[in-house]
Image (tube, rainbow, N blue to C red):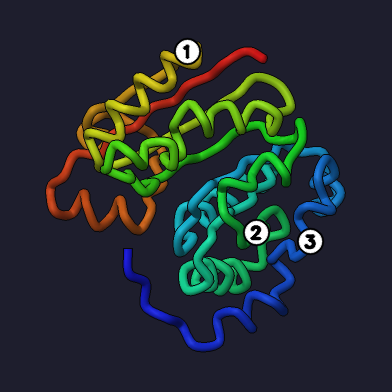
């Protein structure tokens, strides 16, 4: 994926008050940043932030953390959040491979929205729904593991279902065409708006696992 460079993005991120600049130092204590013990939901690959900003606006009793590795993308999410001035929303600029170094038994739900499908077989371990990543997520959760995933990529979706089954997750809900199903309060991402406007089906799955 080629990303357009955004001039000054790194500097904007460095001074933003909605960015957690020392996430590894907060491990196990993220509730302190929000000054409450509300549930913590994280979105890995938050993109330009429409989904998580709108979620935080609608759900003031849930704390949200958006995770994104690209400066030129997360800066757009940060700008949206700063305009909304939401006390229950923060961001971390990081690579998802470090996720188990950041959180410890404090996350209630993970969103995986339109993750990179890494289509080549040799790159399967990089997929955020791979058994390798699902194992990484185990120590993040406070209680049972809860994951919600949306994608337009059928091959990634099928692969993810197999990964969830292999790792003993229970499928709570599944949709093969989200926008044709009767789903209440679906918050779209930027990618979702783009792909659904072209008539592509949007796939969604919710899974849980006792730990």
Q: Is residue 116 above or below residue 210?
A: below
Between label 3 and label 1, give the one nearer the viewer: 3
- Picture residue at 49% right of the left edge, 60% below the top: 49
Alpha-carbon distance for marks 3 and 1?
A: 34 Å
Q: Identify the mark nearer the N-term, 1 or 2.
A: 2
Q: Position of residue 120 (x, y in %)?
A: 27, 42
Locate the N terminus and report the quarter of the image it occupies: bottom left
Q: Residue 185 location in percent, x, y? A: 41, 40
Find residue 92 and name its label: 2
In terms of image quadrants, where is residue 84?
A: bottom right
- Secondary structure under tag 3 reads loop
The C terminus sits in image quarter: top right
**Horizontal and vertical percent position of residue 66:** 58, 54
CA separation in Å, label 1 and label 2: 29 Å
Q: Is residue 102 above or below residue 131?
A: below
Q: Quadrant of residue 39?
A: top right
The label on residue 88 is: none
Q: Nearer the viewer, residue 81 or 129?
A: 129
Q: Which residue lies at the image location 56% right of the left edge and 74% below the top edge?
A: 79
In the picture as drawn, the residue positioned furthest to the bottom comes out as: 7
For label 3, count other residues whose C-alpha is less than 10 Å away and answer few (under 14), some (14-19) or many (20+).
few
- Taking depth in this image into account, of 194 and 164 the one nearest to the observer is 164
Give the left or right position of residue 74, taking residue 64 as reference. left
Mark 3 or 1, nearer chain start: 3
**Where does label 3 land, which residue?**
22
Which residue position holds label 1? 170
Q: Dot 1 lies on which element?
A: strand
Q: Residue at x 50, y 66 (%)?
A: 70
Mark 1 Cα within 10 Å, few/some/many (few <14, many 20+)?
some
Q: Name the element at disc 2.
A: strand
Give the mark nearest the N terminus, 2 or 3. 3
- Judge left or right: residue 11 versus residue 192: right
């Amino acid at each position: 994926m080629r990303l357009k460079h955004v001039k000054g993005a790194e500097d904007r991120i460095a001074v933003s008050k909605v960015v957690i600049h020392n996430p590894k130092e907060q491990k196990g204590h993220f509730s302190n940043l929000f000054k409450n013990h509300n549930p913590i939901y994280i979105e890995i690959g938050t993109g330009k932030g429409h989904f998580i900003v709108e979620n935080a606006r609608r759900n003031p009793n849930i704390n949200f953390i958006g995770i994104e590795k690209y400066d030129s993308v997360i800066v757009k999410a940060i700008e949206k959040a700063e305009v909304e001035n939401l006390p229950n929303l923060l961001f971390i600029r990081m690579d998802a491979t470090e996720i188990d170094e950041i959180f410890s038994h404090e996350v209630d739900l993970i969103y995986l929205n339109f993750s990179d499908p890494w289509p080549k077989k040799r790159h399967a371990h990089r997929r955020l729904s791979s058994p390798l990543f699902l194992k990484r997520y185990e120590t993040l959760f406070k209680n049972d593991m809860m994951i919600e995933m949306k994608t337009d990529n059928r091959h990634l979706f099928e692969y993810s279902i197999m990964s969830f089954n292999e790792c003993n997750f229970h499928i709570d809900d599944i949709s093969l065409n989200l926008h044709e199903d009767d789903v209440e309060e679906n918050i779209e991402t930027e990618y979702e708006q783009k792909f659904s406007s072209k008539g592509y089906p949007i796939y969604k799955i919710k899974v849980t696992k006792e730990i």
